[in-house]
């Protein structure tokens, strides 16, 4: 928040077959005497992340066509065109946002929903309407992006584990190989590829590869002992829960509340995020 960095801690467990992730604590990160948080350090960090926001090679052939749809949507948001559109439908134009890839699909879906309300005789839109050839290309692109959108929405579910996420990403890679730089198990953006691969292997029941020496030692074992990792399936495959926390924190810590102490902020968020774990009777018992 601003120039202050916070760290949040969650606990994950399973109860009656349902994964639970209560928020345990949140506190500001204390900067050590050797920590360097000046502008130069932030520039180095940004330089390592910015390449991942480059244009996806999958969308590169369609950029000109998408820009044309973006221009059309901007025209439809003007006062005159918005008034015309409002007489025909309650649907509103949607714009594409550079930092929100899903907005590309959202804009395309809305474009095709609004096509029936466009008049070919409207001189104000004649120059910005896509040609029939571009329209066909965009329709094919929308069908491909619908698969990506489906996987993206499913990854936001709370009941997924790392194996489910890996299966979804592998399935998406089969139809969209251009996403390999982002979705492969050993992609550069994966924080702990070895750990994630190990968890996926255990959850899938895939046995570890045994060498020659391991096979010799296994022959004289009279009984096998199995080691169960009961909590592997509750490891969150995505950071959605943390992102939602800091998004709600931004709503709590507005400009007029910048003087809130970290203790008060943590208490407010602790009660808000964990509202399913307490009710009026809990408050009454504490009082």
Image (tube, rainbow, N blue to C red):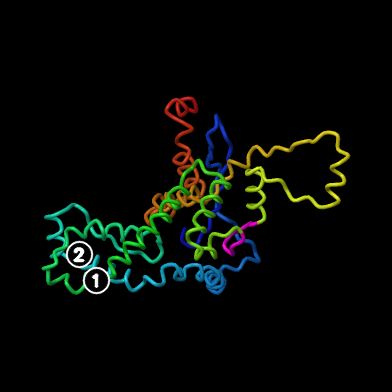
In the figure, 215 relative to 67: above or below? above
Please give the label number shown on residue 108. none
Q: Position of residue 4 (x, y in %)?
A: 51, 59
| Label 1: element kind | loop
Disc 1 versus disc 2: nearer the observer: 1
Foreground residue among 212 and 118: 212
Foreground residue among 163 and 48: 163
Circle 1 is placed at which residue position? 131
Label 1: few (<14), some (14–19) or many (≥20) C-alpha neighbours in 10 Å: few
Contact? badges 1 and 2 (CB < 8 Å): no
| Label 2: element kind | helix
Foreground residue among 251 and 162: 162
Horizontal side of 128 relative to 283 (left or right) equals: left
Question: Residue at image x 55%, y 29%?
Answer: 16
Question: Residue at image x 53%, y 58%?
Answer: 5
Please give the label number shown on residue 76. 2
Membership of 163 in magenta stretch: no
Give the magenta-colored segment's residue range. 186-193
Would you say the magenta stretch is mainly helix, strand or loop? loop
Horizontal side of 174 relative to 146 (left or right) equals: right
Membership of 191 in magenta stretch: yes
Q: Quadrant of residue 31?
A: bottom right
Question: Residue at image x 49%, y 33%?
Answer: 277
Identify the mark nearer the N-term, 1 or 2: 2
Q: Position of residue 274 (x, y in %)?
A: 48, 38
Q: Position of residue 284 (x, y in %)?
A: 45, 26
Foreground residue among 117 and 73: 117
């Amino acid at each position: 928040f601003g120039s202050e960095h916070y760290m949040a801690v969650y606990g994950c467990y399973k109860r009656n077959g349902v994964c639970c992730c209560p928020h345990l604590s949140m506190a500001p990160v204390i900067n050590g005497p050797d920590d360097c948080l000046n502008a130069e350090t932030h520039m180095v960090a940004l330089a390592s992340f910015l390449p991942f926001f480059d244009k996806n090679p999958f969308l590169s052939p369609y950029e000109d066509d998408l820009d044309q749809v973006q221009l059309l949507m901007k025209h439809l948001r003007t006062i005159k065109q918005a008034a015309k559109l409002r007489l025909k439908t309650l649907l509103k134009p949607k714009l594409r946002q550079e930092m929100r890839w899903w907005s590309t699909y959202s804009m395309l879906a809305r474009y095709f929903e609004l096509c029936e309300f466009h008049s070919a005789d409207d001189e104000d839109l004649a120059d910005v309407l896509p040609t029939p050839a571009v329209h066909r290309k965009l329709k094919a692109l929308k069908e491909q992006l619908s698969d990506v959108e489906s996987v993206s929405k499913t990854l936001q579910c709370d009941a997924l584990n790392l194996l489910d996420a890996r299966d979804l990403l592998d399935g998406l890679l089969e139809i969209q190989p251009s996403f390999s730089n982002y979705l492969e198990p050993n992609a550069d953006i994966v924080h702990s590829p070895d750990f994630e691969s190990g968890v996926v292997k255990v959850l899938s029941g895939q046995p570890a590869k045994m060498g020659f020496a391991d096979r010799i030692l296994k022959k004289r074992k009279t009984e096998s002992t199995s080691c169960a990792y009961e909590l592997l399936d509750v490891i969150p495959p995505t950071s959605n829960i943390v992102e939602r926390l800091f998004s709600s924190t931004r709503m709590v810590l507005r400009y007029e509340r910048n003087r809130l102490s970290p203790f008060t902020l943590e208490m407010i968020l602790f009660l808000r995020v964990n509202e399913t774990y307490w009710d009026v009777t809990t408050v009454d018992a504490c009082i």
